Amino acid sequence: MSKTIQLIGVPTDIGAGARGASMGPEALRVAGIIEMLRAHDLEVLDQGNLIGPANPWLPPVDGYRHLEQVKQWNETLHDAYYAALSQGHLPITLGGDHCLGIGSISAVARHCRETGKELRVLWLDAHADFNTNELTPTGNIHGMPVAVLCGIGPEILTKIGGHKPAITPDVVRQIGIRSVDQGEKRLVHQMGLDVFDMRFIDEEGMRATMQQALYGMTENTHLHVSFDVDFLDPSIAPGVGTTVAGGPSYREAQLCMEMIADTGRLASLDIMELNPAFDVKNQTAQLAVDLVDSLFGKSTLMRV
């Protein structure tokens, strides 16, 4: 991989139900993400963090918490992400909560429309993130980004990137899902979202899961990985605000990343929901960096 990596820090927990993800970008830097990427002989640009509104920590209005602030953060991220892609860089979001997937993926989708690329999104997460203001029990927008990207939600979010919907459900493969709200389940089924939940992984194994999730990609595919750290089992990754027991083990997660790396198609990445306020001596950040190391090609043996 010869692309320049551009790190985009987005220090906000504006869409989350717990404070602390705003400290995620610095925790990833402290855990050595820049040094790890440079060890792969990659040029790394880190121009610091984006700036946006503070978190007012208010209750929901019409089923949305902090809608205006979420819009501002995602517009800012969209613009930075799109600029990085336009320069031929591989952007990495250092989140920040997962509402920021609206900004990053809308930028990727715009780039793909303009360049004729086929988009594939791997959504690694404990949650489907397909809620709406009518279905959500909390109003937290970090539970809504996939729905918003698919055109379901307020126009100030669904039109970020200039095209509604930014994506269609058929480009998404969700992996590791094990927490979906009751009404959200029906909407996921209705929209035909391709979900590899933990039961599927338990029954079929991570290898078969990833083979299916990656199937059909070509040399013209832009592969975007949106990695919510709560994808991992909380026994190995306590540093998130929304832990759900029963996630992938260390080796399952490593195999997931290694099989993505084997495709050679990774073109953009989010690292989301890392919350140092819940972590133990930055171990979750270090694990995230270790897994991203595999995503960029680290392996035990030389493989051809």
Image: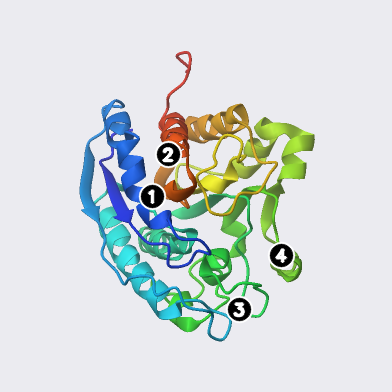
Mark 3 and mark 1 residues within 8 Å of each other at the beta carbon: no
Q: Which mark is residue 294?
A: none
Q: Residue at x 57, y 34 (%)?
A: 236
The residues bearing labels 3 and 2 have C-alpha atoms spaced at a distance of 31 Å
Mark 3 and mark 2 residues within 8 Å of each other at the beta carbon: no
Q: Secondary structure at mark 3?
A: loop
Q: Secondary structure at mark 4?
A: loop
Local crowd size for mark 2, using a 10 Å CA cut-off: few (<14), some (14–19), many (≥20): many
The residues bearing labels 1 and 2 have C-alpha atoms spaced at a distance of 8 Å
Q: Which mark is residue 24?
A: 1
Q: Secondary structure at mark 1?
A: helix
Which-is-in-front pick, marks 4 and 1?
1
Mark 4 and mark 1 residues within 8 Å of each other at the beta carbon: no
The residues bearing labels 3 and 4 have C-alpha atoms spaced at a distance of 13 Å
Residue 155 lies, in percent from the top left, at 48, 82
The residues bearing labels 4 and 2 have C-alpha atoms spaced at a distance of 28 Å
Q: Amino acid at mark 4?
A: Asp
The numbered mark, 3 or 1, whose residue comes first in the sequence reads 1
Q: Horizontally, is 275 left or right of 132 in the view?
A: left
Residue 172 lies, in percent from the top left, at 58, 55
The residues bearing labels 3 and 1 have C-alpha atoms spaced at a distance of 26 Å
The numbered mark, 4 or 1, whose residue comes first in the sequence reads 1
The numbered mark, 3 or 2, whose residue comes first in the sequence reads 3
Q: Which mark is residue 133?
A: 3
Q: Horizontally, is 203 left or right of 271 in the view?
A: right
Front residue of 300 and 24: 24
Which residue is labeled 2 in the image? Answer: 285
The numbered mark, 3 or 4, whose residue comes first in the sequence reads 3
Q: Amino acid at mark 3?
A: Asn
Q: Is residue 162 visible?
A: no
Q: Secondary structure at mark 2?
A: helix
